[in-house]
Amino acid sequence: MASVRIREAEEGDCGQILKLIRELAEYEKLSDQVQISEEALRADGFGEYRCLVADLPPAPGDTQGPRVVGYGLYYFIYSTWKGRTVYLEDIYVTPEYRGQGIGSKIIRRVAQVALDQGCSQFRLAVLDWNQRAMALYKALGAQDLTEAEGWHAFTFDGEAMRKLAGK
Amino acid sequence: MASVRIREAEEGDCGQILKLIRELAEYEKLSDQVQISEEALRADGFGEYRCLVADLPPAPGDTQGPRVVGYGLYYFIYSTWKGRTVYLEDIYVTPEYRGQGIGSKIIRRVAQVALDQGCSQFRLAVLDWNQRAMALYKALGAQDLTEAEGWHAFTFDGEAMRKLAGK
């Protein structure tokens, strides 16, 4: 199997990244929630977020360029308890490239970036039925804060926000 | 009771904000986790985060300046499903000023900022035993994502990150 490389995403990767964002949402059974477009992803990147991709070098004679088989999209958040923190919003590897340690490689790279940027923590969220992912994160040393401390995630959607804001 | 004003925090508020950060962590029974200093809060603000404060105008003859009785610290995150999103990291009102709608005022102001900045969502996290806060957020129109979809928050702390990064 061809060797997979982890690198910083570039603007030209946005189309392939969006395809994987949709695959991930389908895997998470929440694909109706994907409202992002390739244009938004391109316009917002990479000021709003940073992204790593796992790609395969093009085969000889292949004019399509490298094929993206995984990605990790992250940004910086701020903990009032511990300061600057990195947050991995998405991590995904296409089914045929799983089991090769690509996800772990992306996670390791994010940890390196986090330390280089002076972060004291590296956070992410996972769905409770995704036991495979939860087991991997725990094996890599992560703690389940929802289990340990009882954190619940809340969201106000667009309509709730407009009501709140009186708009 | 004196009227409370909601305004953007300034550098000179960092000492009072830190005091409230510690009070909130004590309220959440997790005060051993607060490692932030006033210097870090000052140095990191307000590039890493933004902060609203609820304050009381100084009484006549009071040389201490306005007294901060609540705060809401937030930043911008990025949802690959819905784009730019605001995240309210902390919201806190001192016990003697609760029940006056100050928390709701802070939340409304954050929703206004979020809409002004083109955000499609407004997120926050709450501890499951804090039923008072959960009830308030639901009454204001928020959805509990952990309950609805099963999201768990994970964290890698400093040592776990260093192991991951091979440092």
Image: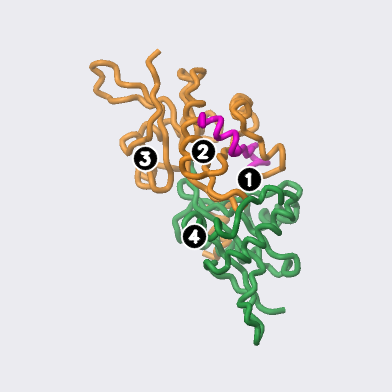
Chain colours: A green, B orange
Query: Dividing the picture into quarters, in which one does residue B21 lie?
Result: top left
Inter-mark Cα distance, 2 to 3: 20 Å
Of residue A1 and residue A20, the one placed in the foreground of this image is A20
Asked if residue B138 lies left or right of residue B99, the reply is right
Inter-mark Cα distance, 2 to 4: 22 Å
Of residue A120 and residue A52, the one placed in the foreground of this image is A52
Q: Give the letter of the chain under mark 3.
A: B
State the residue position of label 2.
Answer: B88
Label 1's element?
strand
Residues behind callouts 3 and 4 on a single chain: no
Q: Are marks 1 and 4 in contact (CB under 8 Å)?
A: no
Q: Which residues are magenta?
A: A144-167
Amino acid type of the residue that numbered disc 4 sits on in the rendered structure: Phe
State the residue position of label 1.
Answer: B153
Which residue does the image show at 42% across and 48% down from the upper left?
Answer: B48
Q: Give the letter of the chain under mark 4.
A: A
Label 4's element?
loop
In the drawing, what numbered circle is on residue B38?
Answer: 3
Whole-percent x and y of residue A123?
57, 50
Mark closer to the observer (2, 1): 2
Label 2's element?
strand
Whole-percent x and y of residue A2?
68, 79
Mark closer to the observer (2, 4): 4
Earlier sequence position, callout 2 versus callout 3 = 3
The quarter of the image holding the N terminus of chain A is: bottom right
Asked if residue B154 lies left or right of residue B148, the reply is left
Residues behind callouts 3 and 1 on a single chain: yes
Which residue does the image show at 53% across and 41% down from the upper left?
Answer: B87
Inter-mark Cα distance, 3 to 4: 30 Å
User: Any magenta on residue A31?
Assistant: no
